[in-house]
Each structure stands twice: as structure tokens, then as C-alpha cells.
Image: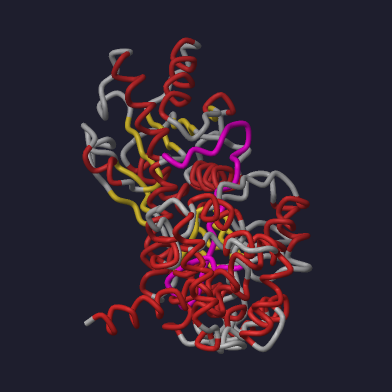
Amino acid sequence: MRAGAESASLRRIDRVTEWVARDLGRKLGVSDAARLAGVSCAAFSRFFHRESGKPFSTYVNDCRCGDSAAVPTARLGSPARRCVAAAAKKCKMSPASRGDAEAASILPEKHWKMTKKRKTRLEDLARLAGVSVATASRALNDSSAVNSQTKLQIWRLAREHAYPFRGHMPGGPTAAAANLTVVVTRPQGRGAELSDPFILELIAGIGEASRDRGSDFTLSHVMPTGYAELATLLDTSRANGVIFIGQSSLHAAFNRLAQSHSHFAVWGAELPKQNYCSVGSDNPLGGRRATLHLIRLGRRRIVFLGDIEAPESMQRRQGYVAALEQSGLPVDKRLTVPAHFGVQAAEASVDALLARRVEFDGIVAASDLIALGAIRALIRAGRSIPEDVAVVGFDDLPLARYSRPALTTIRQDTMLAGRLLVAKLLNSESGGELRSERLPTDLVVRETCGA
């Protein structure tokens, strides 16, 4: 029993001896290791060389190169073990906070603190994972040459040992088939609000499509305002492709970007002389359908309510104008009322229109939120919906179905949009061409237009 206990103790001290040489030696050097053993630096160096067959510094360098078996600790005889054991008796006992639990149980807390300050290196990860440095590097860069199990092991070790992996790890930490980045551009004249219901619906469509393809997507905090920021974003992105939601005033910048970058797609209008890929609804047809529907119901003084500087809203107004001209109705500039994509802005615009005493009996809104803001202002002014004013929105958000009265609107298929945007980028990796797509729009008739 005594022999068994002694054998276990010797094995334990062997591990500590190796740990002192391999880990503390890297940070503290031979003098600190000698102090830990309770002997002079010269005596420790001579003793270690005699017992192990090579200098302590050589042993440490061998360990740094990944040769942890350079000097088997079994070669360190009982005098070496006694040195370490004597040092342990002088140490205050401290629980293991990281690393080798047995070493922590007999090494002083100050050495643990000093060791924790040493940054984990790529060589350390490779040694812990039992792979070469080259394999560890490939795994951190999500190389297909490394199997998924090894990648996950090395990523886990990188997190556990505080390795600065964010510059190396892939965009998604689950070995996804691909990684996409979504960027919401800043609308003209206002901030980009991620809480916008239509943006959330479109992001949901992108997310569902990415999941179906076994891919991850990341929502970026960046809101580029020009070509330089767009180029920097694509140059530094580790994603397989970038999806921009909205063109804002970036049409010329996207055209320039397409000359040097191909792995991006834009949700938005298709504009003249466009060189980049965009996916969006048929906005002119949608605006025309909404207006013709109100005209068929006998409405003659129809307002277009929306931001006419935004590309998509501008195209919806083009459809509105085309419907009026097709029906022989005059295009009254007073009935084109600017309003940003929001409830409060639309309310204010309709309040101002009513204050000017402009007569109207219908509204074609550039979005559902604008339509709902207009309805709030009309009801507050004592106007009846749809008897006095018929209203048509654009988007078909879920809230359009549950508003009272329920909103007639032009439907945009955000699920289809998400699938197309994701497919454009992922298919292009196998040589597919990035071509723009227009989605069909449908009129969804509910209660705000009377029929």
C-alpha cells in the first residue's frame, strides 16, 4: 500500500516537473524555476543537465517547438523529484483555476497569476489538440481540408484558452455550408431602424432561406454611406456574400463597386444603367394596380403618399401616374404628398394636407406603415374609412391584416425575396451569373377600399 502511494506521488511530481519546465519555463526562465525548486540558478542548471541529459533551456525550446516528449520526465531521478517536492512544501496551496489540476494543487497562486497573463499561441492550441500547427491554422480558417470534428475541437480550445480567434474564426461557428452578411443601408434623410416591420420580414425571409441551405447569416452593424465604406466592408468581410437591404442614395456607389466585387446583391429597385444585381418587387406595376383599383371604385381625387426620392417609392409613384394617365385623369401635383416610411411621418403629412383643405377621396400609400399613419390622421379628423377616403397600402405586413379596418394593400413576397437573394450569392460560387430579378406583386383587397 505504501509502495502504491509512493508510486502515485512520484507520478504526480513527474507531471509537475514537466509542467514547470514546459509552461513556467517559457514565461519565467531558469532562474524562476530554480527559485521554485529552492536552489541556486547554477545548481539547478547543473542538476537538471546531469539528470535529464540536456540543458534546461534546450528542453524549454524543444517544448516550444511542440516536442513535449523531448526529455521524458521519468529520467528525472529522485533528487529532482525531491527538489520539486521541497518547493511544493514552501508553497501556499491554491485550487486549480485553469490548466493542470494536479500542478495547481501544489504551485503557488502567484505563479498561476503570472501564467494566466501569458497569451495562448497557435502552437499551444496545436499541442492541446494533438495536431500540427498547420492543421490548427487551417481549422481556425474553416478550411475544407480539416474535418468538422477537428475544427470544433480547436474552436472550443481557442475559446477556453482565450486565444484571440475572432480574426481567424469563420463567420458562423458551426461549420455551416456558407456564411452571409446582411447590411441595412441608411434610408435617405433618416436613420435605419431595424425595428421596421418590413425589414424584419425581409430578414426573416433571408434567414429561412439560409437555414434551408445549411448556411448562417450575420446582421452587420455597419451602415455604409458611400463607395469607400462599401469597398472596405467587402474587402474585410469573411462572408461568402453580402446582402444589402435598400439602395438609398448608393446606386452610383453600387455600380462602381460591381466593377471590382461580384459577391453582393441588393434588395431594391432595378434602375437604368444598373451594373449590379438587385432583387425587388415590380414597383411600377404595384403602384399602377393600387391606383387602378381605386379608380374602378369611382375615386377621382387620389393622393400618392410616400418618399418620392427613395428609388422604390419613386417607381411606385410612376405606376400611380401611369394609371391616372391611362384613365384620363389629371395628375395634380398637390396630390403627391411626401412622407417618410413611418406612421408618425404619414400622420403629419395627412394632417398638413387636410389643413390646406385639398380635396381627395383616395390614398395610394408607398408602404403599409404610411397607410396606417394616414388612417389614424383621417379618423382623428372625423373622416370615415372607406366611405370618405379609400386607402391602399404597399407591403402586406402581418399588421395590415389585423388593423381595423383591415388594410387593402399590394403584397410583396418577402419569403421569395429571401430565397432569391440567398440563391444569387450561393449559386454564384459555382459559376452562376448574378442577374437582377423582379418579383410579382398582388393586390390584396380588404376593408379600407370598400370592395
Question: Residue 396's spot in the image, x, y percent?
Answer: 34, 48
* Left or right position of 110 against 6: right
Q: Give the quarter of the figure containing the N terminus.
A: bottom left
Question: Residue 72's spot in the image, x, y percent?
Answer: 55, 88
Q: Is residue 268 something that shows in the picture?
A: no
Question: Residue 387's spot in the image, x, y percent?
Answer: 25, 26
Q: Is residue 419 something that shows in the picture?
A: yes
Task: Tell which of 39 and 307 is nearer to you.
Answer: 39
Quadrant hosting residue 46: bottom right
The correct choice, above or below, for 443 with respect to 191 in the image is below
Q: Residue at x 36, y 75 (%)?
A: 9
The correct choice, above or below, for 398 with respect to 162 in the image is above
Q: Is residue 375 magenta?
A: no
Question: Residue 269's spot in the image, x, y percent?
Answer: 58, 55
Task: Tell which of 389 and 207 is nearer to you.
Answer: 207
Q: Is residue 178 magenta?
A: yes
The correct choice, above or below, for 285 with respect to 391 in the image is below
Q: Which residues are magenta?
A: 168-195
- Colour scheme employed for the rendering of this structure: secondary structure
Task: Tell which of 65 and 275 is nearer to you.
Answer: 65
Predominant SS along the magenta part: loop
* Left or right position of 172 against 40: left
**How many numbered markers are drawn?**
0
Q: Give the quarter of the figure containing the C terminus.
A: top left
The correct choice, above or below, for 34 with respect to 344 in the image is below
Task: Tell which of 87 and 160 is nearer to you.
Answer: 87
